[in-house]
Amino acid sequence: MPLGRLGLAANALEAFLDESGTNPETPVLSVAGCYAQHNQWLDFKRLWEPHSGTFHAKDGDGKFGKLVECFIEAKINSMLVTVSKEKYKRYANAHLKTAIGNPYAACTLLCAATICGNVLPRPVAFVLESGQPNLTFVKQLLEQMMGAGYPDWRISAVASARKEEFIELQCADFVSHISSSYDKRWMGELFEHKILQHAHLTQDNLEYISYVSTQVFRQAKAMRKAIERNK
């Protein structure tokens, strides 16, 4: 499917996000975002398409070497965000969960924010893998950031798609998979070539964000009460 059919800006960098680890037996939730300029993605597709087939990372390890070669040659960058699902459940308070939602949403928003920060002042067009948990909420939140006066969130478009529609999503599928399966060989390869950045949501991060969320909720509640009193 051409990018234009999803309304992506031609002058924007393009980022493709996918996750791994939503299954109950996997302790860590991983969200990966792979991003590059449009001409770099064209180079990647030219290199990878003859080998891709119906690639899915969970059973495509025989092609990992070729995929990494294509990453390197096309100069595709990637951002990986991870969180322990048990720690998110334990240390993200009710206010944070109300504001953000599940671990997928938290990791996806941090991944998108980091990509935006990495490429400022260039805008970014995001494509999220379809069928993910809490996808609708995340899309709506990212769309609200478009043109809403957030200088660190230069978002030009947001869309969702299946891997069959965008071969670029196979990159994010690969990065999120090697994270959730703790494949140190291929993660090391990406780190060595400086095309992978990683952020992990720790207990301290979750407790701090939870604290901030509570303060925001309290301030909003106080403002509502003040407005009611002054009516």
Image (spheres, rainbow, N blue to C red):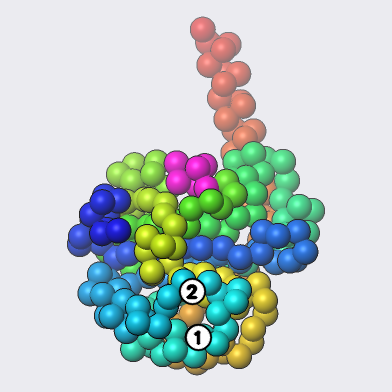
Does the magenta segment cover residue 140?
yes
What residue appears at the point 62 percent right and 26 percent down from the top-left corner?
221
- Asked if residue 49 lies left or right of residue 111, the reply is left
List x then y, in percent, for residue 207: 71, 55
Q: Nearer the viewer, residue 118 or 58?
A: 58
Camera sees residue 196: yes
* Residue found at the very far left of the displayed protein: 11
Could you give the CA–CA distance between mark 2 and mark 1, rounded to whole angstroms? 8 Å
What residue appears at the point 58 percent right and 11 percent down from the top-left corner?
229
List x then y, in percent, for residue 164: 41, 62
Looking at the rendered structure, the kind of residue marked 2 is: Phe
- Mark 1 — residue? 63
Q: Which residues are magenta?
A: 135-141
In this rendering, is residue 177 above or below 162?
Answer: below
Q: Quick one: SS at disc 2?
A: loop
| Badge 2 or badge 1: first in the primary sequence | 2
**What numbered label is drawn on residue 55?**
2
Q: Nearer the viewer, residue 80 or 148?
A: 80
Residue 183 placement: quadrant: bottom right
CB of mark 2 within 8 Å of CB of mark 1? yes
Looking at the rendered structure, the kind of residue marked 1 is: Lys
Q: Nearer the viewer, residue 101 or 175?
A: 175
